[in-house]
Amino acid sequence: MNAPTCAALRRRLGSVRELDQRVELLAEQVRGQPTDRLLDLLAELTRAAVRRDPAAIEAVLAWIVLSMAPRTPLAARERELFRRAQERNDPLLFTLLQPPFPTVVAEPPPGQVLTARDGRPLTLGERRAAARRGNRFLLDRLLADPDPDVVARVLRNPALTEREAVRIAAWRPGRPEVLVEVLRCPRWAVRPSVQAALLRNPAMPVALATRLVLLLPSPKLREVARDLEASLLVRLACRRQLETIGGRRRAPDVQ
C-alpha cells in the first residue's frame, strides 16, 4: 500500500462528515504503513495543526480518538512509533505519541434524570428522544443527564449552541465517558473554547487531554496552564506545548 501524502489524506478525511467514519478511514490509510513513512505523515499533520489548518486539526483529532479507541489497530505499534519519535527529537510527535498516563478518577455522583410534569422520571428512551428532537428548554435540562448517549444526542442536536457545548465540557462533577462524547462530536471537538473546557475539567482522561493540547491556540494554552482546577499533568503539557511552538518566551508558572 502506497503511503498517502499529507494533502491527500486531509482531502479524504475532509470528505467524510462523521468523526467515527474519519477514524475508520484513517485506520485504513495507516494500517501497514512503514514506521518512517507514518511518522513523516504525522509530523506534517501536527505541524499543520499547530498552524491552525482546519483539515489538519480534524486529522489529528481523528488520530487521537483512534489511538485511544478499544482494540485500536495501533496498539501493537505505539511503542515503536514513540521510540522513533524520541529519536527524531520532534516534540510535537512526542506529544501525539506519548504513552497514556495511569490515572484514577473518583466516580462522580449520578446526574439528575429529567422528570415529566407529573414528577415521573423519564425513561432512557424518552430522554434520548427528547435529546434528539427537544426544544431549547428541554436541551438545557438534559445537559447533565447521567447517560452518555443522551448527552451525545444533545451534542448533535442542531439547536445546541457553542455556549451550551462548553457547559457540557465544563460540567462538575464531570464524567469521563461524557467528556469523551464531546471529543467525538465533530461539530464541537474542533472549537478551541470546547477543547479548553475539556482540558480544565479534572474528569477528562489525562491520556486524551495531554494529546489535545496540540490543537489549542496559544491564548487558550496559556489560560489552561494558569488554571489550578486543571490537572497538573495537563497544565505541564500546556506549558511544554507553549515552549515548543514559541507562544511566548517564558511559559506561565505551573503550581
Image: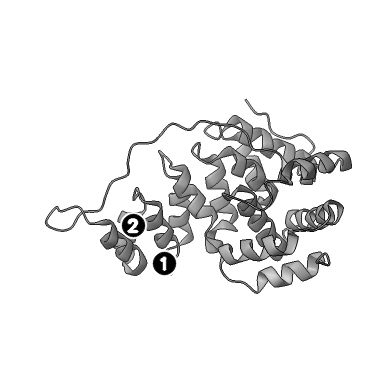
Is residue 143 in view?
Answer: yes
Is residue 246 in view?
Answer: no
Question: Taking 175 as reference, is 117 above or below it?
Answer: below
Tell me what residue is drawn at x 80 percent, y 37 percent. 249
Instruction: Tell me the distance, in whole angstroms, between the alpha carbons under discs 1 and 2.
Output: 12 Å
Q: Position of residue 85 (x, y in %)?
A: 82, 43
The kind of secondary structure element at disc 2 is helix
Q: Amino acid at mark 1?
A: Asn
Tell me what residue is drawn at x 48 percent, y 59 percent. 162
Q: Position of residue 145 (x, y in %)?
A: 34, 50
Question: Taking 109 as reference, is 48 above or below it?
Answer: below
Tell me what residue is drawn at x 87 percent, y 39 percent. 87
Residue reaching furthest bottom?
15
Left or right of residue 163: residue 227: right
Q: Position of residue 182 (x, y in %)?
A: 50, 54
Figure quadrant of residue 55: bottom right
Q: Which mark is residue 241?
A: none
Left or right of residue 173: residue 207: right
Q: Amino acid at mark 2?
A: Asp
Q: Which residue is mark 2?
A: 140
Q: Earlier in the sequence, mark 1 or mark 2?
A: 2
Left or right of residue 177: residue 128: left
Instruction: Specify few, some or many for label 1: CA neighbours under 10 Å numbering under 14, 14-19, or 20 or more.
Output: some
Quadrant where the image shows the N terminus: bottom right
Using the image as rendered, state which of residue 44 and residue 28 is in the foreground.
Answer: 28
In this view, the mark in front (1 or 2): 1
Tell me what residue is drawn at x 64 percent, y 38 percent. 100
The kind of secondary structure element at disc 1 is loop
Question: Taking 87 as reference, is 119 above or below it?
Answer: below
Q: Which residue is mark 1?
A: 157
